[in-house]
Amino acid sequence: MDWKNKIAVANTGGNSISFIDPRQSKEEYRIQLNSGTGPCDLIKPGYTSHLLITQIYDNSLACMDLNSGTIEKVLQVGCHPRYITLCSITHNVYISNADSDSISIVGNKKNLKLISQIPTGSMPQGIDCHPRLPVLAVANMNSQDVWFINTREFNIINMKRIDGYPTQVRFSRSGDILYIGCYLHNGHSQSRILMLTLDGYEIYGEIPIGCVPFQIIEAGDGKYLLVISFESGIMEVINIFSGRVEKRIEMNSMAYGIALDDKGRYAYVTNTKENTVAAVDWKKGRKITDIQVGKEPSGIVYLHA
């Protein structure tokens, strides 16, 4: 199976994985998974030929061999596993379990195995590992806090109370900043991106945005943040240096996941309601095309060779 430099998409409602050829802007093939599993988020560890898939309806993590296109192993984790991240230091995989208020730790060096479950705050959502330090950040939406966990010892380093409902966290490439996406249920205040320094774990700035921050990624060599909103179907392009939203790009649907191509020029955004992936030229501020995939696409990842 030719998977290199393709884009993999988890179709939650269709129980399948789509593979997109970005050069032709079309779905090349689709692999059907077991009924009722609900593939959600995706990650490809390093230079392996494996694709790890959280399955929210099956409460499991699946490992796909990309060369054969088959599922090699399914591992039971926590309840309603959604987001997944990989620690570059320990090579362990971390999964947020929204309905069991916990993080699953999965060993990934040889064979997948469940190492431990760590209790967190209420309804953990976005998670991210520091690029160079053994630190995991967890956004707990209902308890309105962000937890920092040591990925070697599995102990809690810090718990930071957040004024708002944190939905997503993302470390900067340099590792000196944690971006926290927040919103308020009552709508009286703007949603915003908070900036936290690891030196003292203090919030030192915020950027007002006009959407509920569902996913956050860095782009343009760390000069920009791309933020998408599931509620409004909008991508906002934020200039980090000016602290302002430079562009608002309409997706015309429920935007869920986002991935950049290998050159960082185009962003690919899953649209859950329309069963499509939008190809976006984020620098020019325009959507180029919609690519048809399976039912309810969610997680998305670019498969580097």
Image (tube, rainbow, N blue to C red):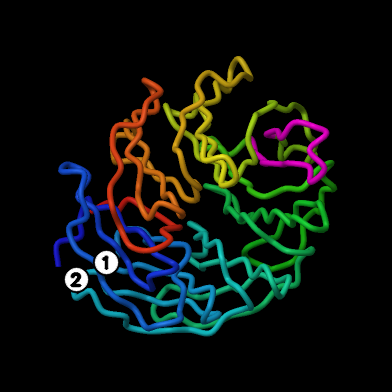
The amino acid beneath tag 1 is Ser
Q: Is residue 150 left or right of residue 19?
A: right
- Residue 232 position, x and y percent, is 57, 40
Instruction: List the single residue furthest toward the top.
Output: 242
User: Which residue sits at x=67%, y=67%?
Assistant: 98
Q: Residues within 10 Å of mark 1 (few under 14, many from 20)?
A: some
Query: Any magenta on residue 172?
Result: no
**Residue at 37% of width from left, 38% of height from top?**
267
Nearest the camera: 192 or 11?
Answer: 11
Please give the label number shown on residue 49: 1
| Tag of residue 149 | none
Mark 2 and mark 1: Cα distance apart in space: 7 Å
Q: At 35% across and 67% down in the image, what residue appears?
A: 51
Which quadrant of the view contains residue 150? bottom right
Q: Identify the magenta region.
A: 177-193
Residue at numbered disc 2 = 67
**Helix, strand or loop under label 1:** loop
Q: Amino acid at mark 2?
A: Asn
Rendered position, 182 above or below 70 = above
Please tell me which residue lies in front, 267 or 110: 267
Q: From this view, report whether residue 282 is shown above or below residue 76.
A: above
Q: In the rendered image of this protein, does residue 58 appear above or below residue 283?
A: below
Residue 180 shown in magenta: yes
The spot of residue 251 in percent (x, y) is: 44, 37
Asked if the residues shown at circle 2 and circle 1 are in contact, with their CB atoms under 8 angstroms apart, the answer is yes
Lateral position of residue 160 relative to residue 128, left or right:
right
